[in-house]
Amino acid sequence: MSEIDILSFGETMAMFVAEQAGDLASVGQFHKRIAGADSNVAIGLSRLGFKVAWLSRVGADSLGRFVIDTLEKEGVDCRHVDIDTAHPTGFQLKSRTEDGSDPAVEYFRRGSAASHLSPHSIVPQLLNARHLHATGIPPALSETARQMSFELMTRMREAGRSVSFDPNLRPSLWASEQQMISEINRLAALAHWVLPGLSEGRLLTGFDDPADIAAFYLDQGAEAVAIKLGPHGAYYRTQQDQGFVAGVPVQTVIDTVGAGDGFAVGMISALLENHSFADAVQRANWIGSRAVQSRGDMEGLPTRAELPPPFAARSYAPAWECSP
């Protein structure tokens, strides 16, 4: 049995979050945190007791050390993260909002260490992980990072491991919208569980209705699809079942960034614990609702002890007999 439950990979940046609301140009104080869809999911799964490894590159700089130190304090295995002496760790500036709206984010990541990920970065022993979680961000960083994404997902699926995929669209990183749609859908076809947001699904498939979006990915090879509907919850569809799962009411939305990553944490953790897909969506909705009530991308992700009783049961039996 593998010592690793879940492998996650991609780019994690240092993030400087404004301490005051207003235009970033006028803000004088920032709080240093980390930001990365893949590492948010890694942290969330680690807090739930899973053994999680993260594969990436960071610069040989203080921000790179900060990223690794933060993840290791969360229990994430970073032993196979490359230290790049030629390229820096990326970072971002994030505004503070008081009304629950999406914050403004400015990225400084071009030419970063993580953009130099490649198939050569793949560590063979990590391929023994039970599950691979992938997002659409690494393939947007560079051609070599895109090659790595395809190879990792292909090799894990061929080995009989389960694979989840969150499109996490970043249009500004792609040469064109057409390329983004084509490449993201090729990657989604390698996953067992596809987890798009509704607007992402509409752009990627050309369909408006969640049922049609899900059917598109089932036809491409996915075994199950969950479509995030924001405060309205989520729609799911498998080859045998489909339905809507209501969202969890939230009194005050503080920060929407990271809600989708919280949803992925709920889905992956529940499915690896032998819960049904419908029950997994319920846990995903609940964790997503937690995420929007905290400032920061991953600060609201719960520990195992914080899960409500219906979601706390745990089993290591595989929930799915995933096809190769």
Image (tube, rainbow, N blue to C red):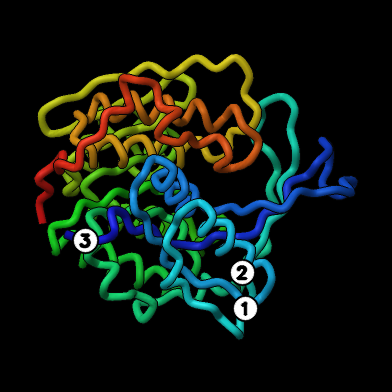
Q: Which amino acid lies under the numbered mark 3 shown in the image of this protein?
A: Ser
Q: Which residue is mark 2?
A: 64
Q: Pointer 3 and pointer 2: residues touching (CB < 8 Å)? A: no
Q: Residue at x 36, y 25 (%)?
A: 234
Residue 251 is left or right of residue 200, and the answer is: right
Whether residue 322 appears in this view of the structure is yes
Q: Residue at x 42, y 30 (%)?
A: 305
Name which of mark 3 and mark 2 comes first in the sequence: 3
Give the residue type at disc 1. Ala
For residue 2, which numbered disc appears in the image?
3
Image position, residue 104 (x, y; %): 70, 43
Measured in 3D between alpha carbons, the distance from the residue under mark 1 to the one under mark 2, in whole angstroms, is 6 Å
Give the structural element (helix, strand or loop) at label 2.
helix
Which of the two discs, 3 and 1, labels the residue nearer the N terminus? 3
In this picture, residue 239 sits left or right of residue 264: left
Amino acid type, residue under disc 2 in the picture: Gly
Disc 1, disc 2: CB below 8 Å? yes
Going 29% across and 68% down the picture, which residue do you hit? Answer: 126
| Disc number placed over residue 85 in the picture, else none | none
Coordinates of residue 310 in the picture (x, y in percent) = 31, 20
Give SS at disc 3.
loop
Q: Which residue is mark 1?
A: 60
Residue 122 picture quarter = bottom left
Q: Residue 99's spot in the image, x, y percent? A: 72, 24
